[in-house]
């Protein structure tokens, strides 16, 4: 572990401070082997018991150390930019503007991703629906809460920890994902209400999975020689593009998603990936089958009308899943539709 942490600026000091460890506990940690990615839960649990710290706190600290080591190695110059964004970098933001949430059941692949996120977490994390802890256990991601999230604050956080700043800027944010060389960090506005904080975390994690890790895994599986291109170590050649096309492996998977039009709107491609991330977020926070079970058990309001039924269902979803009101209403409407309950002619 000592060599592993040495790749992070002040890695030992930072992890000791974040976990409030004694010098003796730190020394015990440093002689441990680094956790294996495919055995992260088991290895971190064993290390935490040996060192004497809470395992989710240790997992979060190790994730942050890993992403800082990756970001600290980032070398991007304007001369190395790809036509569609910065080579090797995914940056995706959830701004403060109102957004359209998907009002239907998520695709099977998205539902499976959400289920696997919870399955990767310890039982106590699943029991208390701790989204932040679940993300840390499930993916190579650190979560950072900053007050009134702005680009200047994000860049200050990065620079203070030895990582280069982001080269772009937009207005106030609720959340921001930065992914680089298979590691990621999610920044969240710490002043958000708890329900919106959870939704923002889940949304950015959707970007990490759908727009970075899943495409990356497909490329590495079908054309591993393209790793240097994926990680921004070099620009793709014509031969690389040909191999990628034959393998159905998109080289443009590291997409810069921060750009907005002058009127504040986003490009069509950005809207599509935002919808997919939101679909994942709703599935993660309010799993479809659990939602339908909840709605089936709800008493019918009297007199029965669709607006009253929807209002009651949305309130139940908000309370049960800790969703913001708008997300709860969207999820409730989709669930009622699946159960055959639709608005009448005059309620449309």
Image: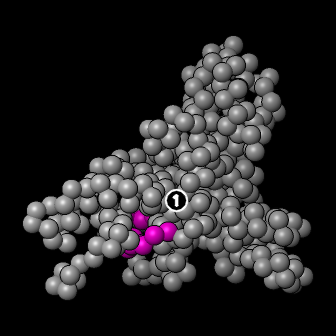
Q: Position of residue 212 (x, y in %)?
A: 66, 64
Q: Is 270 left, or right, of 230 in this rendering?
A: left
Determine if the magenta segment contains residue 97. Answer: yes
Above/below status of 136 relative to 229? above
Along the line of sight, the residue nearer the viewer: 299 or 85? 299
Q: Which of the image's four quarters has the N terminus?
A: top right
Q: Position of residue 78 (x, y in %)?
A: 70, 71
- Residue, x 16% and y 85% (percent of image)? 346
Above/below status of 212 relative to 157? below
Residue farthest toward the top in the current orientation of the protein: 24
Pointer 1 residue: 204
Q: Is 47 left, or right, of 152 in this rendering?
A: right
- Residue, x 55% and y 47% (percent of image)? 118
Determine if the magenta segment contains residue 175. Answer: no
- Residue, x 38% and y 60% (percent of image)? 292
* Label 1: which secondary element: helix
């Amino acid at each position: 572990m000592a060599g592993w942490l040495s790749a992070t600026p002040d890695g030992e000091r930072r992890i000791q401070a974040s976990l409030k460890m004694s010098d003796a506990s730190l020394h015990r940690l440093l002689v441990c082997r680094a956790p294996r990615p495919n055995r992260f839960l088991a290895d971190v649990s064993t290390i935490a018991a040996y060192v004497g710290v809470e395992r989710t706190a240790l997992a979060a600290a190790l994730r942050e150390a890993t992403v800082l080591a990756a970001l600290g190695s980032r070398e991007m110059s304007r001369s190395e930019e790809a036509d569609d964004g910065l080579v090797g970098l995914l940056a995706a933001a959830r701004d403060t503007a109102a957004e359209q949430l998907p009002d239907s059941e998520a695709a099977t692949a998205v539902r499976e991703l959400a289920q696997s996120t919870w399955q990767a977490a310890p039982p106590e994390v699943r029991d208390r629906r701790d989204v932040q802890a679940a993300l840390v256990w499930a993916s190579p991601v650190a979560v950072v809460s900053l007050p009134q999230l702005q680009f200047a604050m994000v860049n200050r956080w990065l620079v203070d920890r030895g990582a280069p700043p982001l080269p772009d800027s937009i207005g106030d944010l609720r959340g921001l994902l930065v992914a680089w060389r298979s590691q990621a960090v999610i920044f969240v506005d710490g002043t958000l209400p708890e329900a919106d904080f959870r939704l923002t975390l889940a949304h950015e994690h959707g970007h990490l999975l759908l727009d970075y890790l899943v495409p990356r895994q497909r490329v590495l599986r079908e054309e591993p020689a393209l790793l240097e291109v994926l990680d921004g170590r070099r620009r793709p050649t014509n031969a690389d593009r040909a191999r990628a096309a034959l393998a159905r492996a998109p080289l443009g998977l590291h997409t810069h998603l921060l750009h907005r039009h002058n009127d504040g709107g986003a490009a069509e491609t950005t809207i599509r990936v935002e919808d997919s991330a939101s679909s994942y977020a709703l599935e993660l926070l309010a799993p479809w089958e659990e939602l339908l079970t909840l709605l089936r058990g709800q008493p019918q309001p009297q007199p029965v009308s669709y607006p009253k039924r929807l209002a009651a269902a949305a309130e139940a979803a908000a309370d049960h899943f800790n969703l913001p009101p708008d997300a709860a209403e969207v999820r409730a409407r989709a669930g009622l539709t699946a159960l055959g309950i639709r608005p009448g002619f005059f309620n449309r």
